[in-house]
Amino acid sequence: MSVSEQDVLKALRAVKDPDLHQDIVTLGFIKNMKIDGGKVDFDIEMTTPACPVKDLFKSQAAAEVKKVSGVTEVEVRMTSNVRQAPTGIKNLNMPTVKNLIAVASGKGGVGKSTVSANLALALAKAGASVGLMDADVYGPSIPRMLGVLGQQPETDPLSKKMVPFEKHGIKFMSVGMLQQESDTALIWRGPMASKLVQQFLGGVEWGALDYLLIDLPPGTGDIQLTLTQSVPLAGAVIVTTPQDVARTITQKGLRMFQQLQVPIIGVVENMSGFVCEHCHQVTPIFKKGGGRKMAEELAVPFLGEIPLEQVIAADGDYGVPTVAAHPDSASGRAYDGIARQMASQLSIINAATAQVSSRPKEVNTQDPQVTVITWDDGKVVRYPNRYLRSMCPCAQCVNEVTGERMVRLESIDPEVRILSVAPVGRYALHFQWSDGHGTGLYSFETLRKLGE
């Protein structure tokens, strides 16, 4: 009995992406299918080599195809093709870089540079082409962490751009490489620092990269604003430590990116607890759960926790980040997991953004009964607040398996209103309601359909 491609694709529709909520056939992941008698082989092309469910996809796909009548052998190859961030703005400065990711924190001393370096290495280890740009012009630490000190960058003779350094499988550039002496203090005003960042964006021969991580200085100043105005960021990763004072300050940095329409990829909690090198137990020195709490409050993804280990500081001083020096340590495993979650969340953001055809230009919540949204194509829609609240798409209001709505219009307070509105990247809005509800993300597509 001959096996048809149609039967195989039908079987593969049973394999669904848990994040994108569609089957791998509809998503276009199946490539290069060949059928020879009862033997079937094909590629599953993921949107990132760091996909956290890659092995699960492979086993599920093979199991489903084996169920097809006439199939005697199945070979599944896992490949990847990182998608370009659909920002709607052409990246003229860095056209060959697919995704620019800001790594930021409103507060210094949270280990942001250490996180940046290790996440870059973890993505590269998974098979992605990765760059790291040290934009912390006042305290550049990446050269020491990567073990490259006292070297000056060369200039490409054709493009006249600086050639980035390469080490541990990643390309990188830092203002620390431009200083004559590593301990020289940089006393620069904001415009000068911003100009240097622009030079790193347009004046470095980065080449083709899947991801370029940009390690930002603490705060919400000129450099952050210059970055968001100079290139279309695919998203931002926010680093914090567990204690309330760090979380409160870091939260301001997160809000800045939201106001600038930069998607929040997620929150990382660094120094979540000290790992004893003898008994391997974890002690929460700075409390615990501050990063997760901030992510829940602001309705953004929580990417994970990184414990505090002695090897992290030693590895950074030695010039070999923990992901390379001690990959099996608790922190090394944590960096790997967070890098995969980061890549996965970015794929979700890119997929959702690609579907957007119209965006809200203004959201007016002054009327206690009605929310008015003016769209960028000029259309003005009035949404009764009670109705808008009843159509919340979150898991508490809609059964994720059956799609049944579990909240009825008549159960909603007639006086309910929106207390605050926050953009979620370039594809959704987050509403905080007066009845305490605030877990739903209303995609632009959903809002437009509700208005119709």
Image (tube, grey):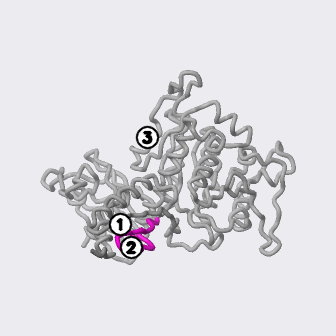
Is residue 44 rendered magenta in the image?
Answer: yes
Viewer-proximal residue, 282 or 195? 282
Viewer-proximal residue, 262 or 178? 178
Q: Secondary structure at mark 2?
A: loop
Q: CA distance from mark 3 to mark 2?
A: 32 Å
| Badge 2 or badge 1: first in the primary sequence | 2
Labels 1 and 3 touching (C-beta < 8 A)? no
Using a 10 Å C-alpha cutoff, classify the residue at mark 3 as few (fewer than 14 neighbours), some (14 to 19) or many (20 or more). Answer: many
Establish if 162 lies above or below 168.
below
Q: Which residues are magenta?
A: 25-45
Q: Secondary structure at mark 1?
A: helix
198 relative to 229 in the view: left or right: right
Viewer-proximal residue, 119 or 162? 119
| Badge 1 or badge 3: first in the primary sequence | 3
Instruction: Look at the magenta stretch and give its main secondary structure.
Output: strand
Establish if 410 lies above or below 327.
below
Using a 10 Å C-alpha cutoff, classify the residue at mark 2 as few (fewer than 14 neighbours), some (14 to 19) or many (20 or more). Answer: some
Labels 2 and 1 touching (C-beta < 8 A)? yes
421 relative to 133 in the view: left or right: left
- Residue at 24 percent across and 73 percent down: it is 452
Circle 2: residue type: Ser
Residue topped by disc 1: 444
Q: CA distance from mark 1 to mark 3?
A: 26 Å
Q: Secondary structure at mark 3?
A: helix
Residue topped by disc 3: 292
Q: Nearer the viewer, mark 3 or mark 2?
A: 3
Q: Nearer the viewer, mark 1 or mark 3?
A: 3
Residue topped by disc 2: 358
Query: Where does the N terminus fall, quadrant-wise?
Result: bottom left
